[in-house]
Image (cartoon, rainbow, N blue to C red):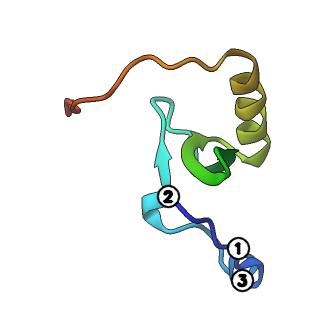
Amino acid sequence: MNVLMFPRVRHDRNAPDAAFVTTDGDNRKLYRFALQYEMGGKSWASEIWAYSAQDAEERVAAMRLSLTMCGQLYGEVEV
């Protein structure tokens, strides 16, 4: 995933596209945030859902302390 910054476009818009916003069980909005890291001389990326930019930063800080690999994913069950 390559993250391209378009600050002028972002500031001219009222909200992210619908695919980048969802709600939790309490009907609070969650937003998709991109994460980037370096490994083996290459840039890698992932994404998380968070309530705000501050919440995303706090989640990244928590990941630095406790992130672990749970296992390989093979599929997804829709509920």
- Vertical order, 5 against 55 (above or below): below
| Within-10-Å neighbours for mark 3: few <14, some 14–19, many 20+ | few
Labels 3 & 1 near each other (Cβ < 8 A): no
Q: For mark 3, give the secondary structure.
A: helix
**Residue 59 at x, y = what percent?**
70, 31
Give the Cα separation between the discs numbered 2 and 3.
17 Å
Q: Earlier in the sequence, mark 2 or mark 1?
A: 1
Q: Amino acid type of disc 3?
A: Asp
* Distance between mark 3 and mark 1 Cα atoms: 13 Å
Counting from the top left corner in percent of width and height, residue 79 is at 21, 30
Query: Residue 73: which disc?
Result: none
Q: Which residue is mark 2?
A: 20
Residue 5, numbered label: 1
Which residue position holds label 3?
Answer: 12
Q: CA distance from mark 2 to mark 1?
A: 16 Å
Q: Compare residues 65 and 58 and report the one nearer the observer.
A: 65
Q: Secondary structure at mark 1?
A: loop
Residue 29 percent across, percent down from the top left:
56, 45
Image-quadrant location for residue 56: top right
Q: Which residue shows up at 76% across the image and 84% down it? A: 8
Please, what is the three-letter code of the amino acid marked with disc 2? Answer: Phe
